[in-house]
Image (tube, rainbow, N blue to C red):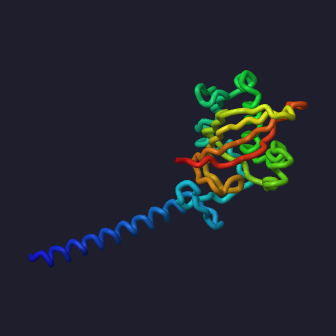
Amino acid sequence: MNDKSANNGKKRLLKIAAIILTVFAVLVLFDIALEKGLSDRPRQEDAGTGEPIFLFNPDYDFDIFTDEAYLDLDRSLHFSDDGGTSTAILTDDNSYNSAHRTARFFREYFSSVIMGDSDKYNSLFTEAYIKKNGAKDRFTMQMMYDMEAILLRYEDCDDGTTLYEFEVRYAIRRNNGTFRDDLDSGVTRPQLYVLSENPDTGAILVAAISDIKQR
């Protein structure tokens, strides 16, 4: 066999391999779609990776606490008030009561999301935030886990208000997009939460949420 024939043979093999890989990739994506019970809503892309986000069909009647796989996940709050130098794992009343008061706020915040309580959720934001961003629409119970809140800094303002900046992370099992449609299932992406504490009432509310760019 001459060199030209050998080269042609290699090219044919490469083309066949490319076709096989393409067919395999399509089949894998098709299997994922079947397994996940994807919603027929248009898919968005993950802002961090550019990959498509697969969302489950929402079921407003589903009780997430009947999902054994979810109950086996880490549903505690990993909380740090010193920039992450030390972290407390908060699971019960005693652990929350002994932690910083912002930890108790996050317990209430995450609980409202997990329970699918949009009214309670919206009540945890400042009026200015709601006016700018709008209230959150109804959402299903959310299988949140791997929740983490790290205090980065705080500032005492001239009017007596205290502002806290937290890096917040969490994942959602079988995400259906009713709470967040920009996050794939099982994926965590850090966000910056700014909490505002009222000097007169001690009430703590969310004043701002923004994404933290990952390098």
Q: Residue at x 65, y 34 (%)?
A: 152
The answer to whether 80 appears left or right of 27 in the picture is right
Q: How many numbered marks are there?
A: 0
Q: Residue at x 81, y 55 (%)?
A: 134
Reply above or below: 168 against 101.
Answer: below
Q: Residue at x 79, y 31 (%)?
A: 156
The answer to whether 139 appears left or right of 86 in the picture is right
Q: Residue at x 64, y 29 (%)?
A: 80
Residue 88's quadrant in the figure?
top right
Location of residue 33 in the rendering, given as x and y in whole percent from the top left corner: 54, 62
Query: From the image, which quarter does the N terminus lie in?
Result: bottom left
Farthest residue in the right direction? 200
The answer to whether 1 appears left or right of 8 in the picture is left
Q: Nearer the viewer, residue 120 or 166?
A: 166
Residue 110's quadrant in the figure?
top right
Q: Nearer the viewer, residue 27 or 112?
A: 112
Location of residue 105 in the rendering, given as x and y in whole percent from the top left corner: 77, 34
Location of residue 116 in the rendering, given as x and y in whole percent from the top left corner: 76, 47
Reply above or below: 3 against 176.
Answer: below
Farthest residue in the front direction? 158
Location of residue 185 in the rendering, given as x and y in whole percent from the top left corner: 59, 51
Q: Nearer the viewer, residue 15 or 60?
A: 15
